[in-house]
Amino acid sequence: MGLKTPAEYRESLRDGRVVYWDGERIDDVARHPKFQIPIAVAERDYDYADPTRREIMTYHDEDGALAHRVFQIPRSETDLAARVELMHDMSIVGGVTGVFMALMSVKDAVAEVSPQYAANIERMYRHVRDNDLRAAEVITDPKGDRSRRAHEQDDPDLYVRIVRRTDEGIVVRGAKLHITAASLVHELVVMPTKGMRQDETDYAVSFSIPVNAPGVSIINRSFAPPELNAFDYPASGHHSMPEGFVVFDDVFVPWDRVFLAGEVQLASRLAQALGLWERTGGLVGSVATSRLFVGLAQLVTEMQGKERDAICQNTIAELICYAEMLRMGLDYACTRYETTPSGMVHPNALAVNTAKYYYAANYHDAVKKLQDLAGGLVLTLPSEADLRNEASGRYIRKYLHTKQSVDVETRMRVYNLIRDLTADAYGGWHLVVALQAGGGLSAQRVMMNRIYDLAGAKAAALAAAGAAAPKALAAE
Ligand SMILES: Cc1cc2nc3c(=O)[nH]c(=O)nc-3n(C[C@H](O)[C@H](O)[C@H](O)COP(=O)(O)OP(=O)(O)OC[C@H]3O[C@@H](n4cnc5c(N)ncnc54)[C@H](O)[C@@H]3O)c2cc1C
């Protein structure tokens, strides 16, 4: 019980979990070279030694015990601000553990249908918090033919489903794809990927299960090879996290870990609750990245002596506009927060969906602007090894010189970061993450249509047109 140390976290992963990566069955995740960078990333969230970081990363729960702040249920604007500050600092492993915020935000709605499931949510939340565990958001099903519903697929397992119910629990089968950090957490929190209909009761299923539960297998994939040097890969050299292809091969889930087992009316509530916190995380990340883009754009422009060029200035102004719209979107979402009936404070749902959409829809264009300013060296810059080689290094220093005030090595570092963030494997990963993680563009469009005050907008439009609202419209 209580906070773990980084070493205790690492050790806790040696629990017999079934993990594959590049054709190899990996028995000891904690020691295997492929997992060293991702584990180091996750371990940082367990490093409570520095007093300033401890202040950001921890809080006292209702029993007075010190816990990781990712488990603090925001009750005020101040709590929400503290959570956003934490999200800026925390690894993606901590980020996905925020799945418990989603569960706790729908607990009341779940209680109306089943007090037992609601009690299970509360108990699992406390179990994970009190033992300083991490959890993955396990939502996205393979989905097979998208034009058919879950129970209409050629293979009934293309959405996770209940195959058996017993007095002790349920048995589930299926897979969930793209699951961030699945191999490096302790609990897999499974939720339906979307709303389910009355004839899909076996697919309306949610639960939490330990990663080492019998029948669970995880196949990993990452943008990063195990070792990347920090000079050539300044971002991905110390930051990578595998996604997991998670298989549930007739996994037994005891009833006290079940949050939903057939109550279709709750399926979309759970899926949507997660979307809000997941998109908030994406938005927090986008604020940092877009600011970095502005800094990199200004640096390459100055380093190449183009800072007085009007086209460069315009491009940088457009990048500033992108970064500021995102920053303001996040600020607005937090200051115009919303409160659930039980008093949980969460970011404004319309603002989060709008700003996340804006980030995703314009991300590729922001990358284009940065790469346009930077030029071909983004791809062709020689590596650190060639710089350190005396003969080739001499040429590199001579011909990458731009002016006295620019140090060639610094210039190379700036280019390496642009390549790493936007053009190499990690850059490609970012391009897809912007679009898909937290739900594709369509998921945010659906939410915007659903939440926006369309009735008010229509009334305003009719009034401006000098027309009275027809009865059907007025009644809305
Ligand atoms: C790096 C990464 C990490 C991720 N991490 C997680 C995670 O931790 N947990 C998790 O559960 N999921 C995770 N995801 C999954 C992510 O949420 C999905 O990729 C996303 O929801 C899209 O689902 P899909 O990939 O099945 O694509 P599809 O559902 O097939 O969608 C593909 C495209 O089809 C179109 N489309 C889909 N539905 C509609 C619609 N109703 N109307 C119009 N167009 C539509 C859109 O253009 C959409 O982008 C991650 C994804 C990535 C790339």
Image: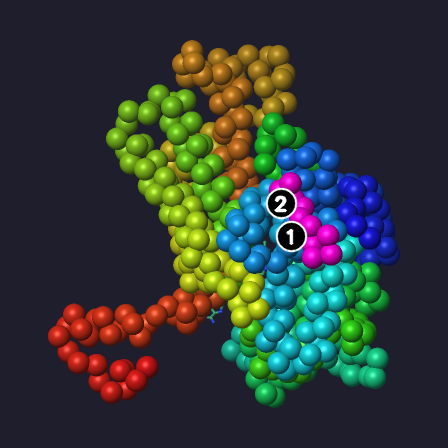
**Quarter of the displayed picture in which ligand 1 can be seen:** bottom right
In the picture of the structure, the residue carrying the numbered disc 1 is 70
Q: Which quarter of the rendering shows the C terminus?
A: bottom left
The amino acid marked with disc number 1 is Val
Q: Are marks 1 and 2 in contact (CB under 8 Å)?
A: yes
The image quadrant that residue 244 belongs to is: bottom right
Q: Secondary structure at mark 2?
A: loop
Q: Is residue 129 above or below residue 223?
A: below
Compare residues 410 and 290 and report the one nearer the observer.
290
- 445 displayed left or right of 209: left
Q: Residue at x 47, y 62 (%)?
A: 338
In the displayed structure image, the side of residue 124 where residue 270 appears, left or right? left
- Near mark 2 (Cα within 10 A), the count class, few <14, some 14-19 or many ≥20, is many
62 within the magenta span: yes
Q: Would residue 103 be seen by someone viewing this image from the given angle?
A: yes
Look at the image and name its color scheme. rainbow
Asked which quadrant contains residue 466, the reply is bottom left
| Number of the front mark, 1 or 2 | 1
Q: Which residue is mark 2?
A: 90
The amino acid at mark 2 is Met
In the picture provided, is 285 more to the left or to the right than 323? Answer: right
| Along the viewing direction, whichever of 118 and 260 lies nearer the viewer | 118
* Whole-percent x, y for residue 347 in the image: 49, 58
Residue toward you, 216 or 121: 121
Q: Which residues are magenta?
A: 55-64
Front residue (pair 211, 25): 211
Q: CA distance from mark 1 to mark 2?
A: 9 Å
